[in-house]
Image (cartoon, grey):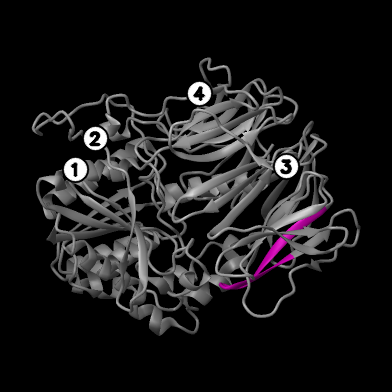
Amino acid sequence: MVYNHFFIQRDIVMMRLILTVSMFLFLAACQQAAVKDSTPVTDDFRVYDTEVFFDTTSLFGSSLNSDGSAVLVSSNETGIYNAFRVPVDGSPKTQLTNSTTDSIYAISWFPQDDRILYSADEGGNELNHLYVREMDGTIKDLTPGDELKANFLSWHDNDQQFYVASNERDPKFFDVYLYDTDHYTRQMVFKNEGGYDVSAISPDGRWLVVGRTNSNADSDLYLYDLEHAKQVAQHITKHDGDVQYRAYSFTPDSTQLIYGTNAHGEFNQAWRYDLKSQNHRPYYSADWDVSGVGFSDNGQYRVVAVNEDALTKLYITDLETGQPLQLPGLPQGNLRGVNFNENADTMVFYLAPDTSPANLYVHQVNTNRVTRLTQTGNPAIDENHLVSGEVRRFESFDGLQIPGILYKPKQAEQQKVPALIFIHGGPGGQSRIGYSPLIQNLVNHGYAIFMINNRGSSGYGKTFFHLDDRKHGDHDLKDVVYNKYYLQSLDWVDDDKIGVIGGSYGGYLTMAAMAFTDEFKVGINIFGVTNWVRTLKSIPPYWESFRKSLYDELGDPATDEERLHAISPVFFGHQVKSPVLIVQGANDPRVLKIESDDMVEAIRSGGTYVDYLVFDDEGHGFSKKNNQIAAAKKYLAFLDEYLK
């Protein structure tokens, strides 16, 4: 299945980022649609109640079962993510898990039956365990224990074994275990004493590739032959200077490693390493970052993901003919989650336009048959009433062009509107084009949104990515301020009503904007870092492999405490002059609740209004619908009172 280790882990990580950095990107609610009675309704525009935008369903995962009859997905239609079986013939789906407390991240069917693997943590603590749901519906924790974190890696091509990474031996590093599918007995096949990042295992189980982070601009790949009793690392990316390398996947025949590197320009290219000849050759390049490469199990189809100006585009090629795979009769939208069955004659994928959630489709290859399997949108919303984002750029303080995504409310055709600068998480994240109930809700209610990709964001080349190193709270903050000046240049924006909002690192820049400038009328800080000294000293142990990279970018609290103190808003909360809303999960392992507690007290000490919303059953990101809805309503009520 093309949904190999890279694509499985990428989608799970992306879902975690969605929940932790921008939890409002894919929310849903099971409430009745309504239109505000107090709002004028015209033939071409309506203002909807907030609940309407959240009466949608979010899906991810596209593993096909052994006979190709059903897709395994995670869906939040029950109020929290659970695993579902979606038949490819269009018949009704079946719920496979019944969690009411913790999100279920569906991973894969077993290769020869309808058991499933899934991942879940407790209360947002990010200590994920790996579970199997048996055919009779019983659940077994394959990685029991306290204070450990485990990740599924891949299936062995014999279909009788699979690989799991776990930090149970040493909280700082992940070892690799080989499990059998019959009794779940296991053996350690790689003891990670070198502090590596475990990346990928060849389908035949012989080769393991691991990464080492040397700095935030430099990394390496190493190869282990797991068939040799004495495991010795083979350094396969020897180089001079700062170059980054990342493993994408092995070819289905286990003869080549496909990896990404920025050694040959600003953007990541895909290269191949021949395991027999040990030769490196170019494989795939574009004018943007190549962000992933995967294959169908039989090797016929290759899927390449390219990050093109905040939009991931997938390029599917039939390697037997060298021609692109043609998909007939699809509506416009972004393709993701591509997966094939064993014979590669059935393909499933998601299609997501900018004005509705992603839906799951199935395509019978070499036919004109494409079937939509899900209905995730809200029929009460006319998509013509929603707004598509448009990529825009503006000039910052030093002349640098800063990209972002601009949403213009329909109200702006009649009057000037207030605006919000939305700052993504990270550092090093990226705001991307795609459907967001929160964004559409705010825009529908008359707020312009600019989703800024300030310097330091990924996707725009390695030079751009490193422009904020050790300059956080300064150059990146100036980008946000100059974003305000750009918005003020638009004749449809009310230049006196501009606020800032962000989650995680975006929450930090939100608080920095409120504490270190007087530019913004309001700020909404969603679990943002406010004390860099404490945050960098309290990072989870399983981040150890990239601790140095984090310190290279932000600073080492042991040597840079004075500068980190100077850029931490919590010590300057008394300087905040405009209203602030802070939202926090009590179980957050990344940004501890005490950070938000202290920030609230610091703002109040200066006499400025601050509202504080805490969810006792959430972590770094909110996965429960009732909490998501409560947060979304709080944002709008706060903005309506203090900005609009």
How far apart are the alpha carbons under marks 3 and 1? 46 Å
Q: Earlier in the sequence, mark 3 or mark 4?
A: 3
Q: Which residue is mark 2?
A: 385
- Please, what is the dominant secondary structure of the magenta stretch? strand
Badge 4 amino acid: Leu
Q: Residue at x 85, y 66 (%)?
A: 232
Q: Are marks 2 and 1 in contact (CB under 8 Å)?
A: yes
Q: Nearer the viewer, mark 2 or mark 3?
A: 3
Position in image of residue 326 (x %, y %): 59, 34
Position in image of residue 606 (x %, y %): 16, 71
- Residue 319's disc is 3
State which region is magenta: 207-221
Q: Is residue 476 left or right of residue 193?
A: left
Q: Does 214 appear in magenta?
A: yes
Q: Earlier in the sequence, mark 2 or mark 1?
A: 2
Q: Nearer the viewer, mark 3 or mark 1?
A: 3
Q: Earlier in the sequence, mark 1 or mark 4?
A: 4
Q: Secondary structure at mark 3?
A: loop
Q: Nearer the viewer, mark 1 or mark 4?
A: 1
Query: Quadrant of residue 133 in the image?
Result: top right
User: For the N terminus, which image quadrant?
Assistant: top right
Q: Which residue is mark 1?
A: 410
Q: Does 629 appear in magenta?
A: no
Q: Which residue is mark 4?
A: 373
Q: Secondary structure at mark 4?
A: loop
